[in-house]
Amino acid sequence: MDFNFTETQGMLRDTLRRYLSDTYDFDKRASMLRMDGGRDPGVWKALATELGILGAALPEAHGGFGGGPIDSMVLMEEFGRAIAVEPYVPTVVIGGNALALTGGAHADALIPGIISGEVVIGAGFYEPQGRYNLADLKTTAKADGSGWTLNGHKSVVVAAPYATHLLVSARTGGSQRESAGVSLFLVEANAKGVVRRDYPCVDGYMASEVYFENANVGPHALLGAEGQALGLIETLVDHAAMAQCAEATGAMKKLHELTLDYSKQRKQFGKAIGDFQVIQHRLVDMFMEAEQATSMTLMGTLRLDDPDRAKWVSQAKAKINKGARALGQWAVQTHGGIGITTELAAGHYFKRLSIIETQYGDFDYHMGRLEERLLAA
């Protein structure tokens, strides 16, 4: 099998890497995090208009390039290398795919807006009591004469503080954890009854607790069939999990490079610490974890259309969660106390890897899901 990227995918990678190396070095990233909203909106606009990459994975019918998950994987690895705080996963991977899969007027109107950088989407599928159970919903949506009325609470909605729209799950029928009765809604972020509590996450991203307090949305806010959205949401989350694996891969590779450089500069007992065999072994272990993450990410991404998609995604996410934690801890241990300071880039990579480990399913969750699939087979 040919695992080489296409010429277009290679151009995407090289274009984004050059841009991020000029725009997103460590000092510039730190200054962005201090801005209102925790980011520079001009970067997102440049990704859309100057680089034209936000449509790489979206369908040609709506103005995209007609790529797919591999294109997102290529881009996310570069975002990971720069630990960029850009809302590509919630906006393009989740929001863009949701619109493309459900179609209709929303897709025709909003996918071009995603591609142009004008539409930013925050995805709220998780609730405080539900952990990683996508069916465990207390948020409800009740039909009324003018559309739907939403009530409930969504936790840690990344990008919500600056999103134009929120993509959220809500129960239109069934009991709290029942598979049936889950629906998907796209809500304008400034709609009446939508209340946010914004905060910065430890990795630099901004997120919100989102509360719906009798929020009235129009009839077209419903995406897909009423009460039958759980399968679609699971698909979107698996795509997001693989995109995060690609981001982790990029961050792991860059953190290994930073640690290797540090081991050549830091001296102890009159010689560089990289000359000591124990440090050399650790650096090799870090390299191996990053390479294994690359292979697992590619495997899982290629299998996103597989009937047994969940098995492949969970294998990749579990392995990368474990590898990212080990590599991050080894990097901090090699750097010593300075490795967790805000002044050194290594600590920020460690924080981002720690957050990725928990997003869209941690190690225990994916091992449990994998066990269920294997026993069922």
Image (cartoon, grey):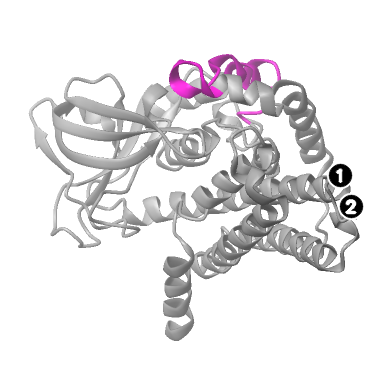
Residue positioned 60% across, 67% down in the render: 319
Question: Is 253 rendered above or below residue 375?
Answer: above
Quarter of the image holding residue 283?
Answer: bottom right
Q: Position of residue 242 (x, y in %)?
A: 57, 53
| Residue 158: assigned label | none
Q: Residue most toward the front?
A: 269
Residue positioned 32% across, 43% down in the render: 224
Q: Is residue 228 left or right of residue 120?
A: left
Is disc 1 placed on a helix, strand or loop?
helix
Count every numbered label the image shows and give the total: 2
Quarter of the image holding residue 326?
Answer: bottom right
Is disc 2 placed on a helix, strand or loop?
strand
- The residue indicated by pointer 1 is 265
Quarter of the image holding residue 81?
Answer: top right
- The residue indicated by pointer 2 is 272
Amino acid identity at mark 2: Ala
Q: Nearer the viewer, residue 270 or 17?
A: 270
Question: Is 253 rendered above or below residue 207?
Answer: below
Residue numbers of the magenta segment: 33-55
Of label 2 and label 1, which has the lower sequence position?
Answer: 1
Question: Is 288 rendered above or below residue 188?
Answer: below
Residue 177 belongs to the span the image colors magenta: no
